[in-house]
Amino acid sequence: MKKIIIIISSLFACVGLFSFVHFLNSPVRDVTSKAEMIQTDEIKMEYVPTKNQLLKSIGDSVDFLGIYEVTEINFNDTPHIILTKEDDNELSFEIKVTDPKEQSFSIPAIKFSPQNIHVSDTFGIAKKNDRYFAYKNNVSLEGEPYNTR
């Protein structure tokens, strides 16, 4: 009986050791090197893309209008948002209120617009064929990745 237990234990130990060695020596698959992301206008990004990501997503011939600051959000009769550039150039867009209590909304006219926007938030606006797109800066002034809350 002891011989059988020793043989079975040895067999399990050998199988475990073989599996461990095989795991350590197996090649690592590179899943990112050949992946190609193709996006159409119908695909909605879950985040605000950077300027470079936006160029890859919608192609060339994009007019980058610059960085705009949210200066007014109006939830009253005609809900709208006003974005202002440093040179006092203003853009106004209608907003779709998704939750009046939380004052959450979306901007249907701006594709990839940031979520949970507050007054004084900033993000970039680009235009292509009378369609607006939002983007964020690649890097902020302090060298940290730029976030839009």
Image (cartoon, rainbow, N blue to C red):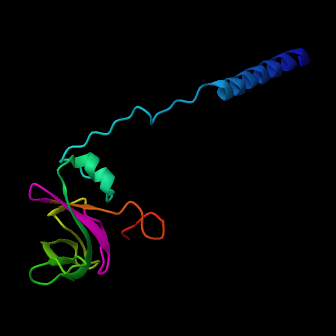
Nearest the eye: 105 or 131: 131
Q: Is residue 39 above or below residue 107?
A: above
* Residue drawn at the location 9% of the way across and 83% of the way down: 77
* Rendering coords of residue 96 (x, y %): 16, 70
| Figure quadrant of residue 79 | bottom left
Q: Is residue 80 in view?
A: yes
Q: Is residue 46 in view?
A: no
Q: Quadrant of the C terminus?
A: bottom left
Q: Residue furthest right?
A: 2
| Figure quadrant of residue 14 | top right
* Rendering coords of residue 145 (x, y %): 44, 63
> Is 129 part of what is drawn in magenta?
yes
| Figure quadrant of residue 9 | top right
Q: Is residue 27 left or right of residue 110?
A: right
Q: Residue furthest front?
A: 87
Q: Which residues are magenta?
A: 113-131
Q: Is residue 34 above or below residue 67?
A: above
Q: Is residue 67 above or below residue 86?
A: above
Q: Is residue 140 left or right of residue 89?
A: right
* Rendering coords of residue 131 (x, y %): 12, 58
* Residue drawn at the location 82% of the way across and 20% of the way down: 10
* Rendering coords of residue 1 (x, y %): 88, 16
Q: How many tags in the picture?
A: 0
Q: Is residue 45 above or below residue 36?
A: below
> Is 123 part of what is drawn in magenta?
yes
* Residue drawn at the location 43% of the way across and 70% of the way down: 141
